[in-house]
Image (tube, grey):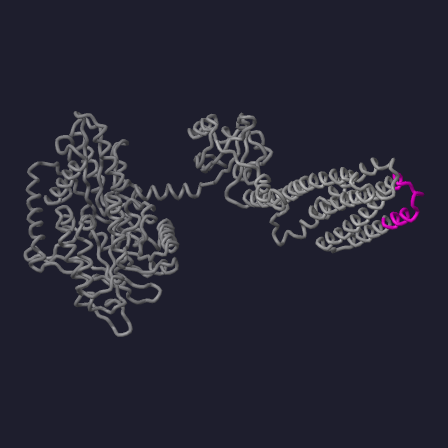
Amino acid sequence: MVVSSPPGRKLIVETPLSLLALTRHHVEPHEENWFARCRADYIRNFPLSLLETVRLALLLLLVGPRTNPVFTLLAIFGWYAVMVLQRSVRRKEASPGFDEKRALRNRLGVIRLRAFWWCCTLFGAALIAPVSSHEGLIALGMAMMMMDGLSAMSLPHLGLAASASGGAAMAAGFLIRNGWDGAPVAIVAGVMACFMHWSLYNLYYMFATRRIRTRRLSQSNETIQLLLNQYDDEGSDWLYEIGSKFQIWHPSQRFADACGRKPEELEGLSLIELIGDAPEAGDLRELFNEGRAFRNVVVPIRVGGVENWWSMNGRPVLREGQTIGWRGFIADITAAKRAEDKVAFMAHYDVLTQLPNRTLFNATLDRAFHRTPRDGSIGLLYVDLDHFKAINDGHGHAVGDKVLVEISRRLEEVVRPRDMIARLGGDEFVILMTDLDAPAAGLAIAERVLGAVGNAIEIEGQIMPIGASIGAAFAPTDGRTGDELLRAADLAMYNAKSRGRRGISVFDPDMQVQMQERRALELDLRAAIVRGELELHYQPLLDINRGVTAGYEALLRWNHASRGTVSPDVFIPIAEETGVIVEIGEWVIRTALAEAAGWPEDLTVAVNMSPAQMKDGNLLPVVVNALAQSGVLPSRLELEITENLLMQESEEVLATLHKLRDLGVKIALDDFGTGYSSLNYLRSFPFDKIKIDRCFVSELAEREDCQAIVRSVISLANELKMTTTAEGVEYGEQLEKLRKDGCDQAQGFLYSRAVPAGELEFKPGQKRAVNE
């Protein structure tokens, strides 16, 4: 083990003979007056007048006042001069506003005069004193060497000079008087001078070091105390201190306010009892009993009947190896906890209906298969509303949303308490039924669902007919995994729709015929590019602040030779499932950039990306080649990805996104808030844009929760220097809300539907959407 040397010893090693390193101390310029006062105070506090008087009296007593009257008069005169100068210096120092540096210089003058007077007096005494007084005179000289040095220790060089000069004067006097017989006196004086040299410099080192360190420590304590007081009084956190029995000590006002009590009520109260019967209280007690420091331990506490959340940090207070208490700080994270719960709710529940969303449903379905015995039965009902699109188109999305809420309520009334209802999106619901005695029990629930949903709904005085097509599938007969069962129920639902809607269809293997039809559509889709049946339409992105078109989003359309226009909702899922989406996606990128090359250079073009495209290793070369062939600047291309895409292949996708962004391509996060909604993605990748999903915008003018979510997303994007685009803007009230909240861009039917590239018009100096 290496033992470090004390700082003083290291300094002695630097200058072993002169010891000058011991007298060098760094003092900040603004501290020079303070250090000068410290050194002057030391000299002021030394009884110099008494010392001068006593040593003069002793000297005259040894020499004899009548031995040499001239010597006696000169000695007294010198003493008087020293007294007068000291009195004058004290009077000046007593004046207000006197400079400490000047006071120290004045003290230097007094010490020099004292040393000169004493050297002369002692030299003369050594020459004339009786032989019988020599021993006493030598003892007095040695003692005064020590006293002169100690009295001027805060001025070490001058103190050493005063001490050594006294010894030199005495030695010189005895050498002159006694010749070489006075050499022992000189040797003793030299030894004393060396001792005073070592002592004075070491004493000064301790004197200066102690005062400087004390000042630094005092300043640090004042700063720490100031920060702690401000932290405790004004911060959102507060300090706490408890004893070994968890009793609270010295609670601050901030602590008391957070508990809804007075400080005197908290004094001595157990912190564990304050937290209550929550399981976290037992966990906290175990941490205290373990005696180890802990951080960010979250505990609930009820204040005024409301549940709050604290994050606690603590360290044990030890005395002689025993834990006598704990100190730490507590942060009130109630707001953050509620925001976290809200984000978690948004990640797993549908904002509109408050039902579980697809993410939570899939997880629950997978768990059900793992927990159900092999001979157990699981049922799945896939519910799709009939004629809901007509309601949306005829009465608007606001009325359509109210219909969805009412349907959700009806579904909850007819299922068993342990059954799970989830909204997968749009007008599609699923009901997961576990622990079924037989498929007949599941079909009985399906009949109740059909009857409940089939009753007309009255909203705003209007009767709206509604119904449902229900597909039923049961495990393990129809599927041995969650995906298989869901696919079977989905096929059964489509079968119910094909049979005239408003009915229940149980999955049958014969439904695979529908899959063949689907495969036929897949084959046609693969040939659609060659046949030129695919086409891009463009919907404008409006710059809200400037009122001009900032760019266009490319939307894919399929004009089938025999089927006519095939909805993207039909062929896009097929393309994604079969992998054809990669080839189609390459065509979309090349076509969109080729058509954008003829647009004004300030307009961007946005292209939606699928998970399969992002996983394809050829994506980067495709983008590079398309940019090179079209001549479009990379900054004009925006690639839109969804949160679900990041959740599936986060590392692989992020690596590809970083490479694309390095090219200058902009990356947008589409449908923000509808998927997993993990804010970690915003931290892991610097998106250029966040697109607010239409489900939050549709009721922006009516619902406060939608307004709060949209404001939060816009504020978050602004803090992260990201552009925000609101989708599905259909009314002027929505636009005004978005403009006030600071949204950058808007997209929706309020401005224009998606139109072919040939119908886009660009006016000179005014690049606005064609249907504005």
Instruction: Report the residue at 12% width, 36% height from top.
Output: 506
The residue closer to the viewer here, 250 or 715, is: 250
Res. 191 in view: yes
Residue projecting furthest to the bottom: 764
| Rendered position, 533 above or below 374 | below
Q: Quadrant location of residue 261?
A: top right
The residue closer to the viewer here, 393 or 519, is: 519
The residue closer to the viewer here, 203 or 318, is: 203
Q: Is residue 432 left or right of residue 562?
A: right
| Rendered position, 200 above or below 320 | below
Position of the C terminus, as image quadrant, is bottom left
Residue stretch in magenta = 60-78
Q: Residue 67 magenta-drawn?
A: yes
Q: Position of residue 762 (x, y in %)?
A: 23, 71
Res. 218 in view: no
Taken as a whole, is the magenta stretch helix, strand or loop?
A: helix
Q: Is residue 511 left or right of residue 323?
A: left
| Rendered position, 505 above or below 376 | below
Q: Position of residue 306 (x, y in %)?
A: 46, 37
Q: Position of residue 679 (x, y in %)?
A: 34, 46
Q: Residue 24 magenta-drawn?
A: no
Instruction: Report the residue at 34% width, 41% height from top.
Output: 344
